[in-house]
Structure formats: structure tokens, C-alpha cells
Amino acid sequence: MNFRDKTILITGATGSFGNAFIKKFLEKYTPNRIKIYSRDEHKQAVLLGKYPNGVLDGFIGDVRDKDRLRRAMDGVDIVIHAAALKRVQSCGYNPFETVKTNIIGSMNVADCALDANVDLVLGISTDKAVAPLNLYGATKMCMEKLLINANNYRGKKRTKISCVRYGNIVGSNGSVVPIWKSQYDSGKPITITNVRATRFWFELDKAIEFVIGCLNEMQNLSGGEIFIPKLPSTKIVDMYHAIYPDKEFTVIGDRIGDKLHETMVLEEEMKHTVEYEHKFLIMPEEPRWSYQQPKGDYCEERTSYRSDNNNWVYGIEEIKKRLEKI
């Protein structure tokens, strides 16, 4: 895609994803304008200060505020919807607020994008949306369903709406690596919930590259897809020993809402899924719009795609090498 004349709006743009996406994107492309949409004026001022060339434009606003969102989408070509409440425990303790942001906010994004006749909308989802065990996952599952099925409302508009689904980013806020570091620095016991746990390994740079690739692919698809990267898996204990080889850990047991293994694609979803070398593509189950079938074979005979049934696994030495680059 030629992004030179495109105007992009990123919701939740001052978060870790938004900051990394803007940095990586501007290293490769020269868009017409990037609108950063968030409610944190301080973080927004800091982000704007990093790029004094005027390509960034700050919009103070919340995805809950439909009128403000509609104004921000004026003249926008591409929307990346990353705004969400994400901390599992916090979301469970504040359920109404989580629903307002993650569900109603996502509905507002889709509605305003259709009204503004935006070209592409890409929602950032999570593995926790798959067979969710906590409120956060349940709201992200709803986000996926809302965005995918919003294509039913587009009529003759050109808007295509899809999602990308992936797990925790290595080293991101709330993931195990910074939690362990905080525990280590404060002299507290370093904790692991379950020694049998596995996770997918996804580095932030790779996640940004994947999202940009999805935007490019969306031009040739019909909307309603869920993009899922193929990733290596790691055992939590291997990740721990790669960082703290000579220090013992404390097992605290599973927390409510935690999963032993990450699931990216359910077995039931595989009949609607096309597999490629580097990704899976889940097709809409009941498309009510003109749909272009992608090239590739459906995965009807395949079981679910989980971090514990994955043939691509990083051991301790590979994890050490990867962590040195982060």
C-alpha cells in the first residue's frame, strides 16, 4: 500500500502499541497525517514532542465519546483501534467501566468509521478473547464480533473492518518479564503461577510489522477477517531460567481468569480458517456482504492452535538470545 497520501487514526495511541507503531511506521513510510486519539493529555504531549515535523496531530478524546470520535475521523482513511482497558484484575474489579470502553467504545469506532466512509479499520485483539475466562477476555471477544459483523452495515460504503489477534508482547507492561524484574529489584520472591504454563513468544517489533502487513493485505480482501500470526512457544519456566539461572522461584498457583496455555485459534474456528506459511486467516462465518475467497486451504482437519501443541518452541538458549535484543 502507498501510505503517502493516507491519514491514519490510532485509538489508544499513547499506549505501548501506539508509541511503537508510530516509531516503526514513520521509519518506513511518509503518511499524510497520523491522528493520535487518546484521553491522556500528558502522554499525548510527550508523543507529539518526539515528532516536531507536524505529521502527528493530537486529539484528546475517549472512544466512549461518539461525537468526539466522529469529529476525529473526519478525513481519515485508516483506523487502528488499539484503545482498551487491559489489566485482567482491574477489568474484573471495574466491570462497567470495562464494558463502556472495550465494547461500547468499539461499537462507536465501527459506527463512526462507517459514517466517515473510512477505507480500512483494524481492531487489535488478544488471545484472551478465545474461550474467555475473565471479563477482559469476554469484552475483547465482543469487540471482535462487533467489528467483524459491522461489515454487515456498510451497504455501498467502501469500509472494510477486520481484526488482528495475538498474545502478550514480550516485555510489555503487565507481562511476566517486567513483573519478575520488579520483584527482583525490590527483593521480593519471584513468582510463577504454574510451572506447566506455556506462552506464545511475540516481540513488539514483529507485532508492528505484522499489523502493517495486515493493513496491506486488507486491500485485497473483503473485510471480516481475523489475522493471526504463527509464533514460537515458550515454557514459562524456561523463560525464567533464561533470565535468572541461579535464583529460585515461588509457585503461587493459578489466579482466577488465568489460562495454563494460550489459544490463538479454537478447533471449532478451524473450519473457517485458512492457513498460510506465516499466519492463519479466520474467515467470517456467515458473510452477508460480497465476499472474495482468499487463496489457500481451509484447516478443517486441524486441531486448535495453542502454545502447548505448537511444533515451534524456543528453549532457554534461544530465549536468552532474543531477550538480549529487546
Image (spheres, helix red, strand yellow):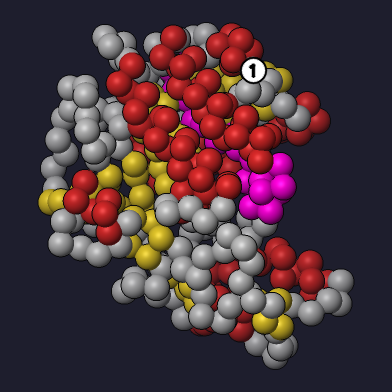
Report the front residue among 160 and 24: 160
Report the front residue among 259 and 38: 259
Badge count: 1
Which residue is located at x 61 percent, y 72 percent?
Answer: 254
Q: Is residue 316 left or right of residue 275?
A: right
Three-letter residue code for mark 1 = Asp
For mark 1, what is the residue?
Answer: 65
Where residue 85 appears, x then y in whole percent? 64, 40
Q: Residues within 10 Å of mark 1 (few under 14, many from 20)?
A: some
Which residue is located at x 41 percent, y 68 percent?
Answer: 307
Asked if residue 80 lies in the magenta stretch, the reply is: yes
Q: Is residue 287 left or right of residue 108?
A: left
Residue 27 appears in view: no
Report the front residue among 304 and 71: 304
Q: Is residue 306 left or right of residue 222?
A: right
| Corner quadrant of residue 100 | top right
Report the front residue among 153 and 77: 153
> What span is in magenta?
76-94
Secondary element under disc 1, as helix, strand or loop, is: loop
Which residue is located at x 76 percent, y 33 percent?
Answer: 43
Q: Is 240 rendered above or below residue 326?
A: below
Where residue 211 appears, x then y in whole percent? 43, 41
Q: Is 68 rendered above or below residue 242?
A: above
Where residue 137 appears, x then y in whole percent? 52, 48
Asked if residue 288 lies in the magenta stretch, the reply is: no
Residue 253 appears in view: yes
**The N terminus lies in which quarter of the figure?**
top left
Which residue is located at x 34 percent, y 71 percent?
Answer: 310
**The C terminus lies in which quarter of the figure?**
bottom right
Where residue 114 appears, x then y in whole percent? 41, 14
Q: Is 13 rendered above or below residue 252?
A: above
